[in-house]
Image (cartoon, rainbow, N blue to C red):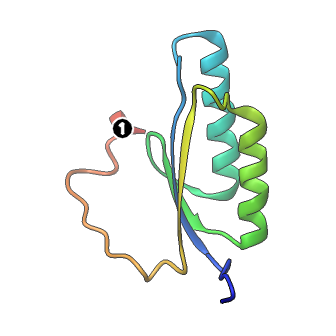
Amino acid sequence: MKKDYNFNYVFLMYDIADEESESGKNRVSKVFKICKKYLSHHQKSVFRGEITPSKLLKLQKELEKVIDKELDFISIIKLKNKSSFLETTLGNKDNDLFL
């Protein structure tokens, strides 16, 4: 059976440990900047958007170089396209308090 790698839409969520320390703040800033290069910022530590498989690999490699693999956590949910999920939102997304 052939494995399908053709994912074109992702949700990315991260949790960087020790955000109060200088090294934690530095990692949070770097992870945010890397994610912003490839995806749209959706919520405090959530990004999403269309991405090619090759850019997804580049994104993952860049993140692996920055995070502390013992402490930090990043989850990437891959979808075939942006029409393959249904979103329900509650509240005001434009509230600056959450960005």
Q: Is 74 situated left or right of 65 in this image?
A: left
In the image, is residue 19 above or below residue 98?
above
Location of residue 34 by image quarter: top right
In the image, is residue 9 above or below residue 46?
below
Q: From this viewpoint, which residue is outermost toward the bottom?
A: 1
The structure residue drawn at horizontal position 48% and vertical position 41%, both measured from the top left corner, is 45
- Nearer to me, 18 or 1: 1
The structure residue drawn at horizontal position 78% and vertical position 37%, both measured from the top left corner, is 65
Q: Quadrant of the C terminus?
A: top left
Q: Is 1 situated left or right of 66 in this image?
A: left
Residue 97 pos. (x, y %): 34, 34
For mark 1, does the 10 Å Cα neighbourhood hold few (<14), some (14 to 19), or many (20 or more) residues?
few
Residue 81 pos. (x, y %): 53, 80
Location of residue 39 by image quarter: bottom right
- Nearer to me, 90 or 2: 2
In the image, is residue 17 above or below residue 96?
above
Q: Quadrant of the N terminus?
A: bottom right
Q: Is 28 situated left or right of 89 in this image?
A: right
In the image, is residue 40 above or below residue 13?
below
Q: What residue would you read off at disc 1?
A: 98
Residue 50 pos. (x, y %): 60, 71
Q: Secondary structure at mark 1?
A: helix
Residue 31 pos. (x, y %): 65, 37
Q: How many marks?
A: 1
Q: From this viewpoint, which residue is outermost toward the top?
A: 21
Amino acid on which disc 1 is placed: Phe
Q: From this viewpoint, which residue is outermost toward the left?
A: 90
The structure residue drawn at horizontal position 31% and vertical position 43%, both measured from the top left corner, is 95
The structure residue drawn at horizontal position 34% and vertical position 49%, both measured from the top left corner, is 94
